[in-house]
Image (cartoon, rainbow, N blue to C red):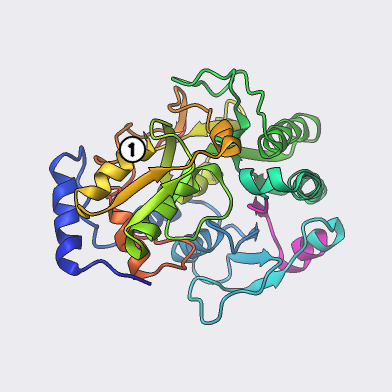
Amino acid sequence: MASIPRKLLRSTVSLLNVNATRNYALPADPLARFKALASATKERPRVLITGSLGQLGRGLNTVYKYMYGDGCVVMTDIVKPPRNATDVSEYSYLDILHQESIERMVVDKGIDTIVHYSALLSAVGEQNVPLALQVNCRGVENVLEVAKKHNLKIFIPSTIGAFGPTTPRDNTPDLTIQCPTTIYGVSKVYAERLGEYYHHKFGVDFRSLRFPGIISATKPGGGTTDYAIQIFYDALEKGRHTCYLRPDTRLPMMYDTDCMASVVQFLAAPNESLTHRTYNVTGFSFTPEEIAKAIKKVMPNFEIDYKICKIRQGIGTVPSRFLEFSIKKSPMTADQNGICDSAQNCSKNPFRASTLAEPGGEAKTSIV
């Protein structure tokens, strides 16, 4: 794996901080905000994470361990975990298509909260619709049934892909026209509505956030916003990137640590404080052209060209900015968000599910 020289890294951070609207020097303890939340939490949760070896699961495990110590998270997935991974603990195989297996895990491990990350993403789902329906719909049905039976709190993430071409693209409210055009988006709308139904019909404490593209050190996994991660790997390894979206395609993004903060805070919020069960959440928006320009400021020889993928470009016709943020952050450009610092994280530890050391201080978050 290629790495960026230290001199270049220093100049990257310095350059991007000139125009930033907040200081992006790393705090002494990037996880301090989570510790503060833990001290305010009445009860220590016992969390089951499905699909935990994907982009977000390992990082969330690390956050919860930091907050409450060992033994608060059970990680599950259907693949073998990497050897000597420091962010994987208490791991078990679990197929979310088998409801009985989920239920046994919940009972045996004393679970009170499920974070259901298992899913096939947008681009991958379009290539295998039957499998996407199985994983994204049957899996949701199974975890909701288990949550109903055992009185569990359950978080199922949604996505900007749950919106479609008829959705207002700017100032998009939480409650609006959705009409997605991909099986991934359709399955996420199904999860939102089914979770809402289980909440009103059976009293299940269902919660969901519509995530934008997540920027982390994890290799892309088949989503439409994957270019925002792959572009850094390509910059390091090849000095150029071929983008499958138009240069002016503006999509909302957020750092993985901000994403985890939103999950932890959202799950800690009192049930009675929620006005509905699904909220929008975002951090900032940028285009492929803007991120390329930001990279060129620290890697002048970097080149980008465009080979438009009709499927992914079609998926990319989603809101670029939300009106009613569940987790509010100031909208900024790629350059202002210190986006090139992600290259530093990739070069340091390219195969972690989360860097847990975002270029930023404490996130300003609030549930409304």
Q: Is residue 189 visible?
A: yes
Say if residue 257 shows up in the picture.
no
Return the residue found at the far right.
Answer: 100
Total count of labels: 1
Vertical position of residue 200 compared to residue 301: above or below: above
Name the quarter where the N terminus is drawn. Answer: bottom left
Q: Residue at x 16, y 61 (%)?
A: 10
Q: Secondary structure at mark 1?
A: helix
* Vertical relation: 85 (above or below) 98: below
Which stretch did the figure color magenta?
103-119
Residue 194 lies in quadrant: top right
Name the residue that disc number 1 marks: 289
Q: Is residue 66 magenta?
A: no
Percent of width and height locating residue 364: 33, 39
The residue under label 1 is which amino acid type?
Glu
Residue drawn at x 75%, y 48% as measured from the top left: 128
| Camera-nearest residue between 239 and 278 | 239
Q: Along the horizontal axis of the image, is 315 left or right of 296? A: right
Q: Residue at x 60, y 43 (%)?
A: 157
Residue pictured at 77% horizontal, 30% vertical: 197
Q: Is residue 146 shown left or right of residue 366?
A: right
